[in-house]
Amino acid sequence: MYGGAAMDGFVSLSAKRAEIKGSYDVIVCGAGIAGIAAALSAKRAGAKRVLLLEREYAPGGLATLGLVTIYLPLCDGRGHQVSFGIAQELLRLSVSKGAEQPIPACWVAPAGPDQRRGERYRCRFNAGLFTCLAERLLVDSGVEILYGATVFDALREGKRLKALLCLQAEGLAAYEANGFVDASGDAALFACAGEETALYPLGNRQAAWYYSCENGKNAFHTIGSAPQPGERVEGGVCGLTSREKTGLMLEARRLILQDFLSRGGLTEEHAISTLPQIPQLRMTRRIVGKNCMRLEDAFVSQSDSVGMFSNWRVSGPVYELPLGALRGEAENLFAAGRVLSADDKMWDIARAIPCCAVSGEAAGLAAALDGDVPKVQAALRARDIPLHWDEIGIGEEDSVTPPKA
């Protein structure tokens, strides 16, 4: 073999050099909802050069490429808005040109908690349209996007990351930065940096969501669903390896074909319109951070809170997001989205779109401000984002212990 040798079941290749392709203030790994929010947040915080790396060729991750097109609620189900800032901005952007299920009227016009109680602040968007809108927002904001870039290693000096290495079309490349955000969905950068991570032990259920044209109308089909918090999925997979992901995609397309043909053959009035382009995995690998969030943490005040999110499954619980759940030992590396530090039950709640956007906004700020908690909190407040549950009008009657799951 040219440039290397094969022995004992392994292939040893000669060392390869990776050219430094650029130096940035902040690099965000992964362009899902969390990565979009992180990149926008860092740029708005004054970071002049922000690079957003993505292994696919479109932004949005599960929300767009995965067709998980339900923007889960920004409210607690009892009339109180919980998530603000970029989380709200992206929700409104997703349906700004039309919606599959629009934002409830009581959350568009001024209204009080009594008028909004029981009506959750959510919507369902069109994946293709949201892809284009989010991409334009990033470009117009001055974020540099690089698609087709897979992060596979990191250079660390003591407690700080110096650079990451990517495999891209032209080969290996290195990118330096002052701050980094891992919004990869599987804690790839944390793992490359030697940080402690944990796999989801309960397994992901097979899912195959798709769109079809039915009698001239757009129809949304959901085959399979996410497991309940703490539920072990029989035959489920973690979904971290290429073989597991390939198996999930093969089975998803088999199920979609079967479901589609059961409704009739291909006609001008009946056709598959959109297929998922990535596996519909909910939880794979997360960080083991300084603070591990739990389902029982509802209405617990966090001194380093950087935002809030609700429980999308049930009305009531509100969680403050501590910056400690977004960081490990590396001082300039922060987690965003479904890789944050949480136990298995909380992981299911924290992986939803609103929390991804909230954690992304906080992580982007932290990366731009070198993790300084008071500065991050001050910057969030300057954006009119409340940080504690008792600042959003929740009274004693609504601050209840979350249900056991």
Image: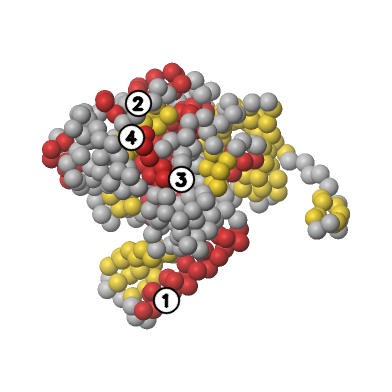
Alpha-carbon neighbours of circle 3 within 10 Å: few (<14), some, or many (≥20)? some
Q: Nearer the viewer, mark 1 or mark 2?
A: 2
- Residue 205 position in % (x across, y down): 45, 60
Residue name at image x 20 percent, y 29 percent: 396
**Label 1 residue SS:** helix
Disc 2 designates what residue? 301
Alpha-carbon distance for marks 1 and 3?
A: 33 Å
Disc 1 + disc 3, Cβ < 8 Å: no
**Sooner in the amino-acid sequence: mark 4 or mark 3:** 4
As drawn, is 296 to the left or to the right of 217? Answer: right
Q: Viewed as shown, does residue 391 lie left or right of 8? A: left
Mark 4–mark 1 Cα distance, whole angstroms, equals 42 Å
Q: Choose mark 4 or mark 1, whichever is in front.
A: 4
**In the rendered image, which residue does mark 4 sit on?**
298
Q: Earlier in the sequence, mark 3 or mark 2?
A: 2
- Picture disc at residue 258: 1
Residue at the spot of label 3: 344
Disc 4 vs disc 3: Cβ atoms closer than 8 Å? no
Quarter of image, res 207? bottom left
Does residue 145 appear in the picture of this structure?
Answer: no
Q: Secondary structure at mark 2?
A: loop
Looking at the image, residue 380 lies above or below residue 184: above
Q: Earlier in the sequence, mark 1 or mark 2?
A: 1
Quadrant (top left, top right, bottom left, bottom right) of the N terminus: bottom right
Disc 4 crowd, CA 10 A, few/some/many (<14, 14-19, 20+): many
Q: Give residue 345's mark.
A: none
Which residue is at a point 25% across and 43% down the rendered structure image?
315
Q: Secondary structure at mark 4?
A: loop
Q: Tell which tag, 1 or 3, sits nearer the viewer.
A: 3
Cα gap from disc 3 to disc 2, whole angstroms? 21 Å
Tag 1–tag 2 contact (CB < 8 Å): no
For the residues labelled 4 and 3, the Cα–Cα distance comes to 16 Å
